[in-house]
Image (tube, rainbow, N blue to C red):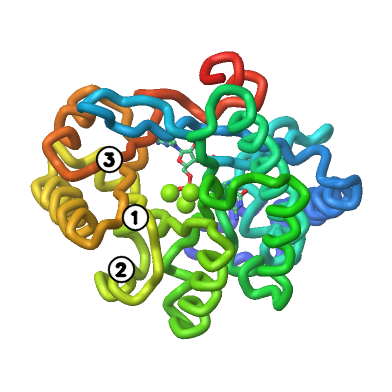
Amino acid sequence: GAKNKGKNRFEFYSPKSEAVMAEKVKMDQAMRKAVEDDCKEFEVYFQPIMEFINGLPQCCGSEALVRWNSSEYGMVMPDKFISQAEQMRLINAIGEHVLLEAAKACKHWNDFGHPEYKVNVNLSVVQLSQNDFIEKLKNVLEVTSINPRNLTLEVTESLAINDMEWMVKILKAIRELGCRVALDDFGTGYSSLNHIRSMPIDTIKIDKAFVSEMDSDHFSEAFVKTISELADSLDVDVCVEGVEMDKQVDMIGKFSVNLAQGFFFDKPLSRGEFEKKYL
Ligand code: C2E
Ligand code: MG
Ligand code: MG
Ligand code: MG
């Protein structure tokens, strides 16, 4: 095998990489098949988002997070298939499915006891680039009759950076339908304070990397504090992601943070589990 041939040698061809490639091709085919089969294997999970009311965290809705429950591979997490789905352009069908399922679920919760619950749905730039994305969104609003105010679309900055004018235009169109926009994973990648100024957004979601280091790293603490103050003065909501410990809850309690999400409160749940606990 490659190991016996010495460490500092490039291997352009080896039985191992051939096996890895074959496995990848197999998984791509399985994903394409799962999409053709009406996306039934793509299950939407919901992680509660908490709002601090008089300092106390209360569920105000959830973020929809997709999982591929594959008959061949078991439960596949988004980090293992989303970027491949983007490259194969399967993300449009998967994303539409997630959007529809999330809106249906939220409409149900709104009708049965929680008119205030909101749902957040992650959008890939590939989805946003479709000429008919706004039409598709309109259609989801119509068929589910969800209150658009209760539907938030999460976008990341990395995708905004190339063509800001286009990005602003499409985000404005989303908001004209009454939906809200959240800037996801803020602080990672191509973050710029200018994005907060030029992008029409309702919520900034501060990436979990800052939250996990808040107590040990002065920069992270100052970052969360400063961004939340800026957001507060611009009348934009702030959600901190990845809250795992009570000391983090204590810290954000001192900042102008009104929303939080993380394993400390709850993990992403199947729709059934979410309804048992929060409906
Ligand atoms: P994200 O949008 O930033 O979602 C938050 C991720 O953080 C989720 O991972 C969630 O399970 C995880 N998380 C929540 N609380 C904690 C915590 O306290 N600690 C830690 N360490 N992690 C926590 P998940 O579900 O694996 O999703 C990963 C990413 O995949 C998402 O990051 C999002 O970018 C993408 N994704 C998920 N669903 C979709 C989708 O339907 N469409 C698209 N385009 N992307 C999606
Ligand atoms: Mg998100
Ligand atoms: Mg995030
Ligand atoms: Mg992310």
For disc 3, the marked residue is 258
For disc 2, the marked residue is 196
Residue 144 percent coordinates (x, y): 73, 45
The quarter of the picture where residue 60 lies is top left
Query: Pointers 1 and 3 in contact (CB under 8 A)?
Result: no
Which residue is nearer to you in this view: 250 or 108? 108
**Vertical order, 185 against 166 (above or below):** above
Q: Residue at x 53, y 27 (%)?
A: 114
User: Tag 1 or tag 2, which sits nearer the N-term?
Assistant: 2
Residue 30 percent coordinates (x, y): 84, 47
Q: CA distance from mark 1 to mark 3?
A: 11 Å
Q: CA distance from mark 3 to mark 2?
A: 17 Å
Residue type (three-letter) at the residue carrying disc 1: Ile
Residue type (three-letter) at the residue carrying disc 3: Asn
The quarter of the picture where residue 257 lies is top left
Label 1 element class: strand
Q: Residues within 10 Å of mark 1 (few under 14, many from 20)?
A: many
**Vertical order, 200 against 145 (above or below):** below
